[in-house]
Image (spheres, rainbow, N blue to C red):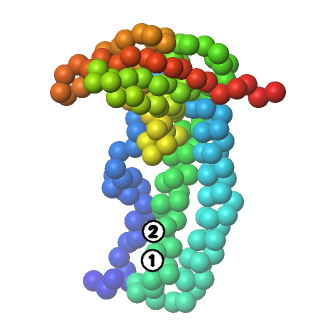
Amino acid sequence: MNKAFTKETDGQDDDDDLPSLPAIPKGSKNYMTPQGYQALKNELLELIDNERPKIVEVVHWAASNGDRSENGDYLYGKKRLREIDRRIRFLTKRLEIAEVVDPSVHHGSEQVFFGATVTYADDEGVERTITIMGIDEADSSKQQVSWIAPVARALLKSKVGDEVALPTPAGVRMLEVLDVVYPEPAH
């Protein structure tokens, strides 16, 4: 059969090709800082208002050139549209279930809650500082961890001076909470 008569997929099967995205534990909310929520919302609006219309225009132009089977602009454009639509669906779902939590309400507290920047020492005396963030906003290159990460779960609700157990594949490690900081409330 000639390739011109093969059916194009509508992209519904493409979701299976994605690596699994961070799952929200059953019965939990999708906690996010106000900044993380705004960043996802900005990304969604950028995709809807700017990037998607540009790609649709390219695909429309490429389709008008005739033979689509060997038209790189058309084939790449359709693939990119599926990627954009998949991301729009993902962001929309995540924003719908988001529970925005402002960590500054705990400013001055010594107890670890969502949004805290925690300095701790492990049982070998190595100090680390992490910030506990939402699943969709945590960036390990900035020492941010998701609130569902094992270290964050071990630290949550502890206070300065507490020792908490962190189960690891190599055995249980003890962590001592040295400092807890929250952002200043906006005035």
| Label 1 residue SS | helix
Judge whether 26 appears above or below 111 on screen. Answer: below
Residue at coordinates 65% horizontally, 57% vertically from top-left? Answer: 46
Q: Visible in this render: residue 112?
A: yes
Determine the image quadrant of residue 17.
bottom left
- Pointer 2 and pointer 1: residues touching (CB < 8 Å)? yes
The residue drawn where x is 39% and y is 28% is 127
Residue 92 vs 175, above or below: the answer is: below
Indicate the quadrant where residue 72 lies: bottom left
CA–CA distance in space, label 2 to label 1: 6 Å
Task: Find residue 64 and report its image quarter.
Answer: bottom right
Callout 2 secondary element: helix
Tell me the quarter of the image containing the C terminus: top right
109 vs 60, nearest the viewer: 109
- Give how far across and how far down residue 71 sits, in percent: 45, 85
Determine if residue 146 is in view: no
Farthest-out residue, right: 187
Residue 13 location (% of width, % of height): 36, 56
Q: Is residue 67 left or right of residue 170?
A: right
Name the image quarter holding the N terminus.
Answer: bottom left
Q: Amino acid at mark 1?
A: Leu
Task: Write down the residue under mark 1.
Answer: 75
According to the image, label 2 marks what residue?
A: 79
Tag count: 2
Name the amino acid type tagged 2.
Lys
Relative vertical location of residue 181 with respect to residue 135 in this rendering, above or below: above
Q: Is 169 above or below relative to 143?
A: above
